[in-house]
Image (cartoon, rainbow, N blue to C red):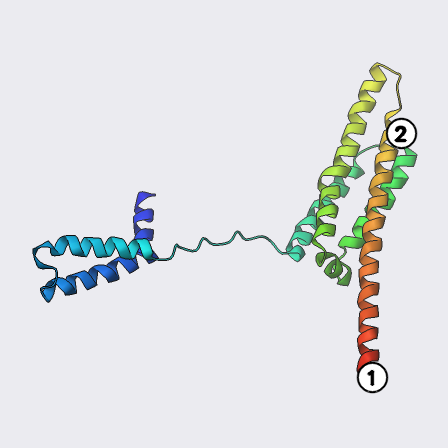
Amino acid sequence: MATSRALGYLESRKNLAGSACGVLGVGLALVGVAGPYWPVVVAGLYGAGALLAPPERVPLPTVPDPAEQLGVLRGDFGRLREYLAEVELPAGAGGRLSELTELYGALLAPGWVTEVLAGDPEAVHALSRAIRTDVPECVDTYNRTRWWTRLAAGGEPPERHLERQLSVLLDEAERLTADLREAEARRQQTHTTYLEERGRS
């Protein structure tokens, strides 16, 4: 670790700038300008050069682009479907969940739809959160609560909560889809306006 730091400093801007100024100090010593204090002059010029050198540029963190994120999300969605296939759900919640997963599947199907989706990072985030967190949490908490309800009946049935949760997620997915459709409609309208204005000019 220390060796790599030392090697990194040798290649740094600070060391290169300091070395260039130090060489200048050696040159001054050779022509007799620095006198007997030439080591101090060389060291001082090296230090000044190192201090004045611009800082090293820290590399920016690499963030996967939306298309790559959607590829990973597609895999996560496949695992979610496998999980859901093993879970027993009441008919009402099962129907809503089928609608929801069908909509997610359509949004994530490879092709131009995912290209539109990739252009909206907020939509990608919302879909990612729903697939990775919201849907699994809804189903898992339903199963846990149902087990406790068998031991101590009473209160609101857990399937009713599950249906409400899935309805909220379905509404959210439909809004997301509508927003993407609206963005495409605006794009089409913009192109129509451009062509009409070009035709008049």
User: Cβ–Cβ below 8 Å for labels 2 and 1?
Assistant: no
- What label does residue 160 carry, if any? 2
- What label does residue 1 carry, if any? none
The Cα–Cα distance between marks 2 and 1, rounded to whole angstroms, is 58 Å
Q: Nearer the viewer, residue 43 or 90?
A: 43
Above or below, 131 against 32 in this view is above
Quadrant showing the N terminus: top left
Residue shown at 82% from the left, 41% from the top: 169
Mark count = 2
Secondary-structure class at tag 1: helix
Secondary-structure class at tag 2: helix
**What type is the residue that disc 1 sits on?**
Gly
Q: Nearer the viewer, residue 45 or 134?
A: 45
Residue 25, given in percent of the width and then of the height, sits at 18, 61
For residue 189, which quarter of the picture?
Answer: bottom right
For residue 53, which quarter of the picture?
Answer: bottom left
Residue 90, given in percent of the width and then of the height, sits at 89, 32
Residue shown at 76% from the left, 63% from the top: 112
**What type is the residue that disc 2 sits on?**
Arg
Residue 70, given in percent of the width and then of the height, sits at 69, 53
30 relative to 139 in the view: left or right: left
Q: Residues within 10 Å of mark 1 (few under 14, many from 20)?
A: few
Residue shown at 71% from the left, 41% from the top: 132
For residue 81, which quarter of the picture?
Answer: top right
Instruction: Determine which residue is flagged by label 1.
Output: 199
Counting residues from the start of the chain, the first of labels 2 and 1 encountered is: 2
Q: Nearer the viewer, residue 146 or 191?
A: 191
Quadrant showing the C terminus: bottom right
46 relative to 200 in the view: left or right: left
